[in-house]
Amino acid sequence: MITHPSFMVEPWALRETELNLDVLAQSESVFALSNGHVGWRGNLDEGEPHGLPGAYLNGVHEQHPLPYAEAGYGYPESGQTMINVTDGKVIRLFVDDHPYDLRYGRLVAHERVLDFRSGILSRSARWTSPGGRTVRISSRRLVSFTQRAVAAVVYEVEPVDGPATVAVQSELVANAQLPRFEGDPRVAAAIESPLLAEEQFAEDTRLRLVHRTDRSALRVGAAADHLVEGPQITRWTAQCEPNVSRLTVTADLVPGQPLRLVKFVAYGWSGERSLPAVHDQVDAAVAAAVSTGWDGLAMAQRAYLDRFWACADVEVEGSARIQQAVRFALFHVLQAAARNENRAIPAKGLTGTGYDGHCFWDTESYVLPVLTFTAPGTVASALRARHRMLPAARERARQLGLAGAAFPWRTIDGAECSAYWPAGTAAFHINAAIAMSADRYVMATGDEDFERGEGLNLLVDTARLWRSLGHHDAEGVFHIDGVTGPDEYSAIARDNLYTNLMARQNLISAANAAARHPERAAELGVDDEETAAWRDAASRMAVPYNEALGVHEQSAGFTSFQRWDFEATPPENYPLLLHYPYFDLYRKQVVKQADVVLAMMECPDTFSDEQKARNFAYYDALTVRDSSLSACFQAVLAAETGHLRLAHAYLSEAALMDLDDLEHNTRDGLHIASLAGTWIALVGGFGGLRRYVGDEGSQDQLAFAPRLPEALSRVAFTLLVRGRRLKVDIGPSLVRYRLVDGEPLVVLHHGEPTTLTADAPVDRRMPPAPMLPEPQQPPGRRPVGLPSEDEEQPTTQDYR
């Protein structure tokens, strides 16, 4: 999409210089604004034309039945779908009675700019109506980081070539008609008219609507107030009905005399509060916004982002597109989490309803690692969302005959919503991702209060699940059977390597945390016998390995499966899940997304350098990347094993997933995990960032092994580590570590301990990358940025 000439490449903004209706839905996603609590898609102010109209509140959903041809024990009975709530951004325009609609009249000019530093979406247009009158329109829009319930718009219209009678209708609209997309399981199940009217109000410049959902019993309120500036004779009227509350402003304008409308919108919702309480909440929030004013909101927005970028910016030299993409990515990752207020972070954030607005393991494995080192306060909030789900997860574990907690594969409020067992409940590895995320957060922040409280609860319940799910065989080896790992083209496997290694770390972390907080552990019923059982299971964990091939197995027996016939698979049959039965995928060597590769990043000390190189080459030849979650981790291991050109290609794919609409579904919302993966590929791949977990009583260590591909001349990034700001600046042959502030810090540089202080930076040379043949990918599945197979003679490396 950004390759279209109307999109410009610049370091701190996304700019569209003309409107392309063919990618309108995609542009609505990339121009979306959110703060993690309120989300507005980047729809045109006037409401139409649109691809997918959208206004969302994190956690607001409706339930729907999950039908089964044959019911089974433990199947979820109902699903949850994020709904389009009251849309407060609509401002319709009429020029001499002609509705402003870009499909009629003539659009002379149109530009939109999303500024990553100000957090404001700006738009300017010049349009000639069917009646021949030309007007200039401008708008600015924000969703506030500092006032979590508030969004605001400044809308201005002015005639250019003569007088015009202008009417502006500012609306709150509920139950907007939504388009339907068929045939793709990643698209949301649309629910028509999910909001039932409870209250409507319109008086002077103030508007309000309150609705509730039927099955989920959530009450949603939206209120708006306006400041109107125009000619002396400017009139307005207010009216309302159950699904629309509207302010209509009219004025006779001449060139040089604009009509300006400042619209403040506030949202609130609850499953418990009464109608008057929600009514009062949104009225109070909008009054506070009016008091602050547009300029005050904009200044606070800029100050918030200044603080964020001081700790999170990644500088890239050598690729203007990657520089823009990583800042675009970080901005949207922040938007997904900044004010999540102990709510889960959906896979699409609040940019669209793809995947029904559910959160998955993506949050803990992709998004939270980035935020842990850049905006750690958001991580504590997201982990508390998981803690809120513990009662439901414990009940789910009991239903499955297990101890501890079984967190849902996909959910909004904590209830399992996956209707397909192999790709849902069997993916128990989400438990370990949550545990590792909690452990990583404590390591990076030193937040002992969190560890003693919610963190220990999460670690204990997840550890108890692994101990009850697995078993020791006659030789004492601990196995975990019947699970699905990250690769969803392999299911119900024995000893999935990633799951086992992550479970091992989960068990060790839980035992260590219990030892650090014995009184709190005792309150949870943890005793020495239980922690000893956890450590024993961890020490005897099965680690599948094929001695003949010299590679780790994705799961026990995986390397004995028949290899997928990649040569006979036409390009149009990807993603495979939309063209082949899972039965066929499950019994072949074909990998949807990084699995063993992910294990090597998350548990680096389990593998030797030689094993990492062989594993990476073997699985890269099997991985088709039918998931946006894969490329970033393949970039990391490609860089670590010395394949820097390939790493850069995988980085490009992760970074441009939405900007280039590589999976053809950006219309449904952004791939927040892949956006986070841009940071992971740069910092974990070319920065070589790893966390090495210490033994009982010893501290974890941060390690770096920086190397750059030829395409990049410099990468620099900042990390927050226990109250310190550490800047890492990587050049072609030299890396500079600079502790900006804080107490001394010891890190590993290519395995060598290096002490950093705030007194002076430390420069270190980078050893050359190992020289190995570049791994091959399945035919037709080379990453973005690499020449095609026809353009380049492949270098074969046989591990079969």
Image (cartoon, rainbow, N blue to C red):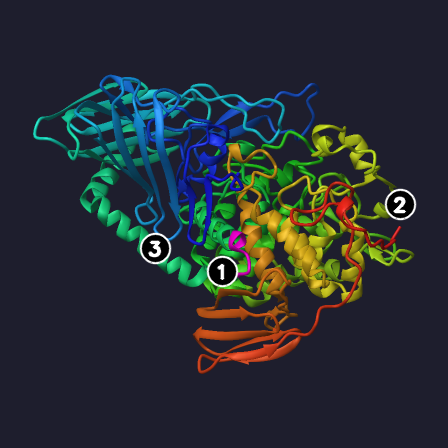
Which disc, if any, is residue 434?
A: none
Quarter assignment of residue 261: top left
Quarter assignment of residue 170: top left
Which residue is disc 3 drawn over?
304
In the foreground, 774 or 480 = 774
In the foreground, 522 or 776 = 776
Which residue is disc 2 drawn over?
560
Q: Residues within 10 Å of mark 3 (few under 14, many from 20)?
A: some
The outermost residue toward the left is 232
Query: Mark 1 falls on what kind of element?
Result: strand
Q: Marks 1 and 3, how far apart in space?
A: 17 Å
Amino acid tagged 1: Val
Residue range corresponding to the magenta coloring: 317-322
Where does the image place residue 507, in percent across and percent down from the top left? Answer: 66, 58
Side of 44 relative to 495 (left or right)? left
Amino acid tagged 3: Tyr
- Mark 2 against mark 1, which lies toward the viewer? 1
Q: Marks 2 and 1, how far apart in space?
A: 43 Å
Query: Mark 2 falls on what kind of element?
Result: helix
Where does the image place residue 768, in percent across and percent down from the top left? Answer: 70, 72
Where does the image place residue 216, in percent across and percent down from the top left? Answer: 45, 27
Vertical arrangement, residue 401 with respect to residue 239, above or below: below
Q: Is residue 442 visible?
A: yes
- Mark 3 against mark 2, which lies toward the viewer? 3
Side of 243 relative to 720 (left or right)? left
Which residue is disc 1 drawn over?
314
Query: Mark 3 falls on what kind of element?
Result: helix
